[in-house]
Amino acid sequence: MTESPAAALSAAEEAIRVENVRRSFRSGKRTVEALAGITARAARSRITGLVGPDGAGKTTLMRLIAGLLLADSGRIEVLGVDVAREPLAVQARLGYMPQRFGLYEDLTVRENLDLYADLQNLAPGGRAARYAELMRMTGLEPFLSRLAGRLSGGMKQKLGLACTLVNPPALLLLDEPTVGVDPVSRRELWQIIEHLVRDAQTTVLFSTAYLDEAERCDHVLLIHEGRLLGSGPPQDFMAEMSGRSFFASAPIGRRALQEILAGTAGVIDTVIQGGRVRVVTTASPDPQAIAARIAGLALTPVPPRFEDSFVARLRTPGASGEALPAPGATGTVTAGASGAEGSRDAVISVQHVTRRFGVFTAVDEVSFEVARGEVFGLLGANGAGKSTTFRMLCGLLPPSAGTLRVAGFDLRTAAATARRRIGYMAQRFSLYGDLTVLQNLTFFASVYGLSGPAQARRIEWARTEFAFAPLLAAKANDLPLGFKQRLALACALMHEPEILFLDEPTSGVDPLARREFWRRIGTLATEGVTVLVTTHFMEEAEYCDRLLIMAEGRVLTEGTPDAIKAAARRAEVPDPTLEDAFIAAIGARGAAAA
Amino acid sequence: MWRRVLALIRKELLAVLADPRSRAVLIGPPLVQLIVFGYAASFDLNHAPIAIYNQDRSLASRDLVARFALSPTFTVKRVLSSGRRIDALIDSGEVRAVVVIDPRFTRDLYRHVPAPIQVIVDGRNSNTGLLIEGYAGDILTDFSRTWSAAHGGDPPPAVLDVRALYNQTLDSHWFIIPGIVALLTQVVTLLVVGLSVAREREIGTFDQLLVTPLRQIDILLGKGLPGLIIGMGEATVIIAATVFWFHVPLRGSLAALYLALLLFVLAVTGIGLAISALSATQQQALLGAFLFMVPSIILSGFATPIANMPPWVQELTLVNPMRYILVVVRAVFLEGADLSSLVPQLWPMALIGLVTLAVAGWLFRKRVV
């Protein structure tokens, strides 16, 4: 692919033209270059994906296109109008749905629609027909009189979209509409958007940090750290990678296999996918040479994914990938680390646990066990009860009935003792932003009762293990996202916990940081740390040894990722992805209930 | 256990002091308020503009006018030659009062019959109106006495001889500024404590704290003690400013004052923690803090004496910690009170502190688990 994107577009076909745009921000004492010279085009009546990890500059570019920010230099034309000069003319023709759409949670669905219709000067006469159309499109019809605050995450996003569409725009800007939305609702949102492009000829600019969504766009603008890494139809990105992706399996553990493969020449990417390891090779692969390194290694070619091309671009020499320290087996765990993937003593045990909030039962008679050294995933749609279960396991919420045992302690009677064995990493990396890296580390070490030489030893460990040395005096708020995530993990590991709780730990971070993170988790698990992950990000679920899918407060299915995928195998989907399997499992339940 | 609580306290102080904005909020506004209140808030009347309509034009009436003109309380802005404009002058607020001297003033003085002087006062601000009335009465009494002494009339049968104890010149700054010590200490403590938990809830670190081995009591202490430290620090700065900048005498025992402040800050910390436990966001915590703050100041005796309130409101003030600390600061500053005389104020604050902290602990448990 060339760096002169879509040069073939004529002016009439062009909806957005971005010419060498730069924009920087001041953050504390640093200047952050959010966009470092971007040139791009978006075609009319197409879905253009603005794809890149968090912090790539997606939102800045969206806001520049919407005329809400001014560029430091460069020029942006939207629908033939210079945005900097006539922002109002552009804004009249576009619909913009920011990341946190301004729904009024104390108003009903209908009142929210009325409000946005008033704001957009939609004549009262035309409303009934438009509402009916929007409600049919989003499936929100039965909820018209429900308070917006009572809708699930997916439904809120759909309502936000409906409000943006009250007055049909020529250009629709969607800033990460699928963040925090479960796979079922994510698919529905995509269907709505595809309909919109087909039926109303709307031009859509869709930003996302989920690289798999790029495959659904007509055209992709791949950005990373404020620069355009590539532009073109997603098939082009994938064609570039054809013949370079394989599933590897061998009669050794998948984590061991990944470690060996990652160190093999010619391999640029290794990702655990269920029981196998997905391998991406350099441009001229030599499968024989790779296979020769491991006895009994079988390599099966698989179709490339969009993410492969992103990783390939970052990992090729000269690209801007950071040098990541390889996670070392530095004796992270001392507490009973027998390090056997096979030993079956249950470290987490949940027996007939129920949790009610008033008359609403969030978790209903849930039972499961997690063995030592296992990476266990808790999945579910929004509102399935997985967060409630997770909070009960962390001791943040007492159960209404049933018993929860963590590391052998009943959470009802010995919560504080049990918590000493737990490390917890919250979604969005809750750190003290005004404190420095060192202060954060020291604080969490002290809170877990480490002092003197023991504390110094762990801080030294974090410093070398996570390459914090040059950053110790930096405020946590000023760190790049990948480092924030590393710091959050380091804080959670200061006291060498037996059990690690992770809440959507790698949502939105770039694929390299995500790989590094999960390799580290894999190492910990090999050393005997039990890991419990809650997520609705299927990529993360693939790293788990075992999964539990919840729906409406109950256990829907439980098993290894491969077993769950196998159960969803149908004639029309011969090789289902985990997302397919998840949607099938939830769909089957819906059908059974009906 | 203490090591963990200490870590939490250290972190809390670092977080408050490392953020330039919250640091500015702690130091700037209280000092500005102290200066502004210290200079602006006063019950004393100075240079009140008045007009004089002297219909008598004699030596005696000129002497009386001079007494008004030379008094620091009044400034004669207008000398009127007719009574037509009196209403307009008061209505526009140009003058606060008009002194009208009757044409028969001197004649009546010499005949030893009551000589009428009329003072027309702007009653819109009743407080100022009363003060003007009082000062005008003083000037007239003084004039009458001098006149009687010089012209052989009967001296007034009974004379008021006032001597103010504690504040000899009745300078109202001496009354108000010690009150500000209590007021600002309460504001700062309440905000620091009230916002601390809510802020952590907003950014998600509170869950992180709750999954550590810290127990409720540890978190309560770790969140409460920094408020206590900051509140006491704030009080120290304001006490220093009161003594060295505004020269209000500090006559009593400093130790007693600090003990009382400690109990007061403890009670306020309990209230702050309870507000914090009930609010999910910083905005709610801020609203909660103000919801408590305004009535607590009005019902404290800071500006209006509690004794003037209706009996049922007076009962209500008994649960207001500020009511007690105001008595203490004024007693220590002006009366030179010592510890033993303050006991009636100290134990209610200790009791309030005990109850509010217990309630905060209970609310914490209820909200967090």
Image (cartoon, coloured by chain):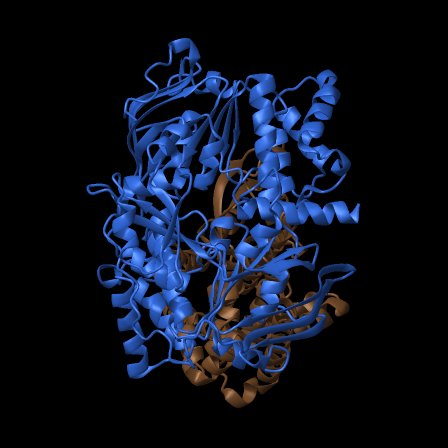
Report whether A259 appears left or right of A79: left
Residue A495: give x, y in percent of width and height: 40, 75
On the rendered structure, is A31 left or right of B313? Answer: left
- Chain A: give its colour: blue
Q: Position of residue B321 (x, y in %)?
A: 60, 73
What percent of the width, then of the height, locates residue A566?
A: 58, 51
Chain B: colour as depicted: brown
Q: Nearer the viewer, residue A271 or A79?
A: A271
* Residue B165 seen in the current view: no
Figure quadrant of the N terminus of chain A = top left
Residue sitting nearer the eye, A333 or A400: A333
Query: Who's the residue at 51% across and 74% down the image?
Result: B219
Q: From the image, which quarter does the C terminus of chain A lie in?
A: top right
Number of numbered discs on residues = 0
| In-image side of A285 versus B336 (left or right) | left
In the picture shown, does residue A231 fall above or below B302? above
Above or below residue A464? Residue A40 is above
Nearer the observer, A453 or B73: A453
